[in-house]
Image (tube, rainbow, N blue to C red):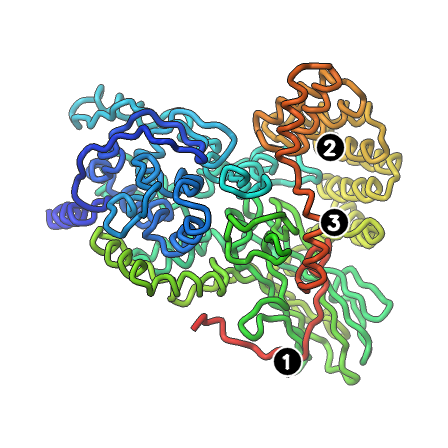
Amino acid sequence: MTRWLFIGVLFSVLGCSYGAPQPVRSTGHDLHPSLMNAPSLDLTRLANTQDCADCHADVASHWMHSAHAYASFDNPWYRVSIDRFRAERGNEESRFCAGCHDPLLLLSGDIDQEVEPSNELAYAGITCLVCHSVESTRPDGNASFTLSDEPVLLPDPASPEQIEAHRARLTMQPLRTAALCGSCHRSFSGAAIGNANHLPGIGDLGDWASSGFAGAVQDHLTSVEKNSCQGCHMHSVVASDAEMAGANDGMVSSHRWAASHTAMAAQLPDPRHAQQATDQLKGAVVVDIGAVRAGHRRYVLAKESRLRGSELLVFDVLLENAGAGHRFPGGARDMHDVWVEVEVRNAAGRLLAISRPTGGSNDDVFVLRATMLDAAADPEILHQVHRFSAPAFDRTLPAHDAQAVRYSMRLPPKLDLPLRVSARLLHRKHSLQFQALACEASHTERGLGFAVGAEAHGKVALDPCVRQPVTTIGDVTVWIGRGAAEREPTGGAARPAIERLLTQALALLHAKQEHVHLAKPSIERALRLAREAKSPHLQAQALVLHARLSSTQGRPKEALAFTQRAEALIGPNPVLDRVRGDAYARVWRWAKAAAAYRRVADASPLDSRAWRDLARAYGSLSQDENALLAADAGLRLAPRNESLLRSRALALAGLGRPAATQAKERWLAHRTPDAQPRLLAACEKEHRRCRRDRQPIPHYTLLPPRKAIHASLDPG
């Protein structure tokens, strides 16, 4: 009885809500440039989460301290971004952000005015009834959903009919689909917010749909099981006795939405939020050490290497996205702080060389981040969307793909062998520069006002100045040089040699064309080991990578022979069709490419990439009707894809259709900005990161410890 009394008091004070009931405020305001559709709604009901908490105590407790609950102005990191956006572009343009972050401020029209700490809706975030009232979605992003005005019946617990009606109303068809998540976890900017060019933004929906997690056909073989957004981010947890209505067999779907929000989660009273966030990160990327070059000698496995004093040592750190169903890191890919640290020590443990953030900067370390350029060709590092002019490069990891980062150092004349090479991938939610910006804003009168308001509404006053948690996502230690074979590797290097070699080859296939041949020794060694292990699947994996190598080098017959050998081992597989299609397309054999891509699209109908490739092949054959059908199928999944829009415009022009002119205008409005090459060239002249990280395999020089003056990670 005491427990139930405590829960009742808790929800009467905190709810999963944010203050006393407000008068009914109807919608009906202009929502553009947000793409949300909504009839006139009762915002009091939409804002009320107390009714949900009365029966769904566990779900309400998850939500009340989730990223969705803190999506609006009580989130100091978001607030500093939108305040700067509104100051430069205007309040009405900020509807662009509000559709996903501040739906109640958008629907009420309050987003068009100054949003003060006294505004109750500024603490609402994304309430229960926002998601549970979505009756349809569109694939555009930027809040491309439609809210229902159908009333919500609060059922009599003794009436099965009312309970069923309540459940039916709140579990509309989009609720358990990726399309619901994608309506906000896909974004773009452009003329509607005053930017000169259309620029794709968050792309988690498309990245997932093109991955093995969605059942899509990739260009290499994987063993991943299908999984959805909800399957990864809303996994089942044990329900408490307080969860009266939502539990199923003693379990309930987590509404914490575990992801990478570690800075926020660390400040919440329930440690399970932080635990889920770190659990989601750990192991998402496998870290390994790849091929080693000492002088002119190259070794595909580090433990086999032989070293001599004073020669140049070069090795690759390999990063494989093994756990995320979209790019890693996902979300706003220009904001994350995910970096690689490397160190080399001798047998006695003395530090010889290092790559680590220095002087408060991470310019000398590899960072998994997308880089956008502003109009002055400078990297925009503070997520000022209104200043984006063109993309520079994207160093985040696609699902089940791998990246090589190259490191070099001059060995000392006298060597104490074996050398220990260690690398780890670290995650911090926000860069130190962005954290400093949010910290400064939190000390203003406005920032302090929202902190007081958050506490008055039963929420945590998040402090952006607090030192952020740093999470180790993955690590590796290997030994190189004489005596290395007697030492045990750890982390990603503890995997079987076949797996390591396949990862290595996958990463090296992303090199410039003149360097992809370096993947061949890794592939051939993996194939030999797979034969010895009598594993048809591993042999096929190696053969597919061999086919991709041959294709990249312009040898389609050889590529096709490798795919035939793989098919003899594992049977027909659409992955083989994709590799064949790519091999044919590279040498302009479009009829055969189209046939292969057709099979890929049939096997992966929800992957816009499959339709993109097919539309391009048909267009190259002047089969305009087929190209139009393929382009339209792809655009139903990715309405602003430049390649699909181009294929559609060219097909309509070839068919002599009146819509060709409008289709061409739409394509031109969504293509990569003409200024991109000029801006990127200018950035390369001024910024070392642009010169280095735009390369397929970035190359870093390890520094002696006396030069690598390590600065504290504490933002101070």
* Amino acid type for the residue under numbered disc 2: Arg
Q: Earlier in the sequence, mark 3 or mark 2?
A: 3
Residue 318 seen in this snapshot: yes
Residue occupying image coordinates x 45% and y 54%: 279
Residue, disc 2: 578
Q: Position of residue 418 (x, y in %)?
A: 72, 76
Q: Check disc 3 and report its element: helix, strand or loop.
A: loop
Give the residue at the far bottom of this rendering. 414
**Mark 1–mark 3 CB contact (< 8 Å):** no
Q: CA distance from mark 1 to mark 3?
A: 31 Å
Residue density around tag 1, few if under 14, some if 14–19, many if 20 or more, within 10 Å: some
Q: Which of these two is toward me, 672 or 529?
A: 672
Q: CA distance from mark 3 to mark 2?
A: 17 Å
Using the image, determine if residue 216 lies above or below residue 538: above
> Which label belongs to residue 125?
none
Q: Kindly identify the amino acid type of the residue bearing the numbered disc 1.
A: Pro
Q: Quadrant of residue 604?
A: top right
In the image shown, does 568 or 357 lie closer to the viewer?
357
Q: Nearer the viewer, residue 451 or 128?
A: 451
- Picture quadrant where residue 106 is located: top left
Asked which quadrant contains residue 44, the reply is top left
Q: Report helix, strand or loop for mark 1.
A: loop
4 or 268, which lies in front?
268
Q: Is residue 653 rendered to the left or right of residue 87?
A: right
Question: Which residue does the image show at 65% across and 26% down from the upper left?
Answer: 603
Mark drawn on residue 705: 1
Counting every numbered tag in the picture gives 3
In the image, taking residue 525 as reference, residue 253 lies left or right, namely left
Spatial distance from mark 2 to mark 1, Cα to Cα? 47 Å
Q: Which residue is the site of mark 3?
A: 510
